[in-house]
Amino acid sequence: MAGSHGSGPTSRKRSGAQSARTGSSRGAALSVGERRGGSFYGRRKGKALRPGQRQAVKTLLPILLIDLGSAPPRKLASLFPVPVLEIRLEIGFGGGEHLLHGARTHAEVGFIGVEPFANGLAKAVTAVSREGIRNVRLFDQDAALLLDWLKADSIARIDLLFPDPWPKKRHWKRRFVNQDNLGRILRVLKSGGEFRFATDVESYAEWTREEVARHGKLITSHDSEAPWDDWPGTRYEAKAARAGRGAKYLSFRKTQ
C-alpha cells in the first residue's frame, strides 16, 4: 500500500503509498511531480477524478490534511475531533482499504494516513466523507517530513505495506527502508511500539531485515508468510497472489 517513497516512503502501488510518502500539506498531491523532499519518487496524479471525488477533495481534504506549518500539538490526540487512545500511522495507503478498515473497526484509535498520489487520496477522502469517519487525518507529501514533524514517542504503530521495491540495484537508494528513515521511525514510536512491513518481493524483505539489524534498535517480533491476526488483506496483495507472488509480513518493536 505504499507508493514510491525512496529514502523516505513508499511504493509501486502498489498498496497505496505511492512512493514513500510524502509529507507536506495542501493540494500538493493534486499536481504531478517526480520528487518532493527526500523520499518521494513517482507520479502524483493518474486518471481524472470523478465528480464525487472532486467534491470531497475540495470540501473535506483541506480539513483532514495535517499542516506542517504549525507546531505539533502538545497532545497529538487533539488532531482528531473525537477522543482516541492511541495513534497509528500508515505510510503510503494506496486506495485506503487497510487504513479505512482500521478506522472503522477501531474507533478508539486515531489513524494518520500518508499518500501523495492524488487518486488514492481522493478515494480515501470520498470514503471518509460518505461514511462519516472521524478518526482519520491525512498527509499528502513526503512521509519523512511528517515523521520529522511528529513529537517523539507519540505513535503506537507505523505500517509500510507493499511499498515500491525499486528492484533495480541502482534504485535501491530510493527504498523507504533505510537508516535515516528507521531513525525517524524509532524516534516517533512509543516504547513497545510496532513497525509493520509487508512486501511481495523477497529481496526487499531481506533488505529490510538487514537494514533493521544494522540499525540495531528494533527487535523482530513477527517474520512470516502468514499475515498478522488482524490483517484485512489488500487489493494489491490479492493481485500479487493471483500472479503467484507470496508475501512476507514483518514486525519490529521498539523496546525502550
Image: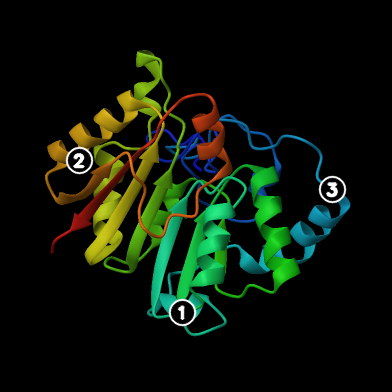
Which of the pair 210/221 is nearer the observer? Answer: 221
How many neighbours does mark 1 have within 10 angstroms: few (below 14), some (14-19), or many (20 or more)? some
Is 170 displayed left or right of 113 in the figure? left
Whether residue 157 is visible: yes
Label 2 SS: helix
Tag of residue 50 = 3
Upstream in sequence: badge 1 or badge 3? 3
Which residue extends farthest right?
Answer: 51
Badge nearest the viewer, 2 or 1: 1
Q: Residue at x 11, y 44 (%)?
A: 216
- On screen, residue 192 versus residue 23, left or right, reads left
Name the residue type under label 2: Val
Is 214 drawn above or below residue 83 in the view shown?
Answer: above
Q: Position of residue 78 (x, y in %)?
A: 48, 80
Residue that label 2 marks? 212
Q: Which residue is mark 1?
A: 108
Which amino acid, mark 1?
A: Glu
